[in-house]
Image (cartoon, rainbow, N blue to C red):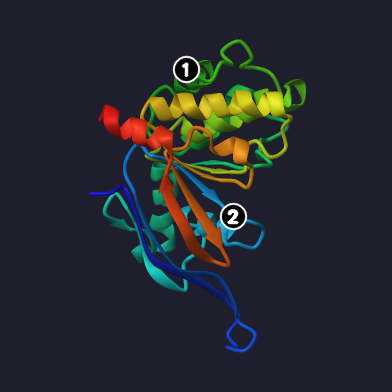
Amino acid sequence: MALVIAKELSKYYGHDEETQVHALEGVSFEIEQGEYIAVMGPSGSGKSTLLAILGAMSPPSLGSLTVDEIDVYGLSQEKRADFRREYLGFVFQQLQLIPYLTALENVMLPLVITDHRDKKELAEQTLDRVGLGNKLNRLPSEMSGGEQSRVAIARAVVNNPPVLLADEPVGSLDSKTGREVLELFKKLHCEGQTIIMVTHNPESIRDADRIIQLRDGKIVDDVKTKVGESAALRL
């Protein structure tokens, strides 16, 4: 069974039918464990709305979202918060690092309310995994943009979430640093991480298995890339 099942997702804003905005309209797809999905589309296509729904942050007006056989929006708000913590990792374009916390402390944040016995050791291992094992005690202001992105990615995966959601993760980076960060996503994918990346940047989709194109709130294309076809052959 697919890890993620989106079924007829729609999102409407406003109650007056004449002025109601249809941000998303009947979007359906399935994602297998370990897939690397790029969601693309122009501004206003529904990418951010879809990401918010997939991130268990914004209930759809219609439709359902199932992750690992869990009806996400059938959960109470409290249980949905637990679901986000256990199942999802988030990488935002603005990163949202805490400026007065070190890299290590930022990565430890998602572990605060977990039962991991050695939170510090796990955070250290995760930072080492993204190539920052020697910069544990640096503040974000003491790091480059690429290093800050790596801290954000480490924070997102420290709990080993089944799904990693990324919103324009290289949108604010120069091309060289952006390529380095995309290489890290590729590495995570090769390690088995399921990734859903929202982007409008063609450079960001080079390692994706599938590209889902949105326009006016609807899926207009959903295709496997050559990377995805090669991965399928290996399986």
**Label 1 sits on residue:** 125
Residue 136, position in %: x, y? 61, 17
Residue 41 is tagged as 2
- Seen from the viewer's position, the closer of residues 189 and 126 is 189
- The Cα atoms of the two marked residues, 2 and 1, are separated by 36 Å
Q: Is residue 221 above or below residue 193?
A: below
Tag 2 near tag 1, CB within 8 Å: no
- Percent from the top left, x then y, of residue 122? 45, 22
Name the foreground residue: 186 vs 95.
186
Vertical side of 204 occupied by 126: above or below: above
Q: Residues within 10 Å of mark 1 (few under 14, many from 20)?
A: some
Residue 168 falls in which quadrant of the image? Answer: top right
Image quarter of the C terminus: top left
Q: Is label 2 or label 1 in front?
A: 2
In the figure, is residue 186 to the left or right of 65? right
Q: Which residue appears farthest toward the front when viewing the image?
A: 226
The crowd level at tag 2 (other Cα within 10 Å; few <14, some 14-19, many 20+) is many
Vertical comparison of 192 with 215: above or below:
above
Q: Is residue 35 above or below residue 58?
A: above
**Residue 114 visible from this viewpoint:** no
Residue 153: x %, y % from top left: 55, 31
Which quadrant of the structure image shows residue 107? Answer: top right
Measuring 65% from the left and 42% from the top, which residue is drawn there? 93
Left of 142 or right of it: where is 36? left
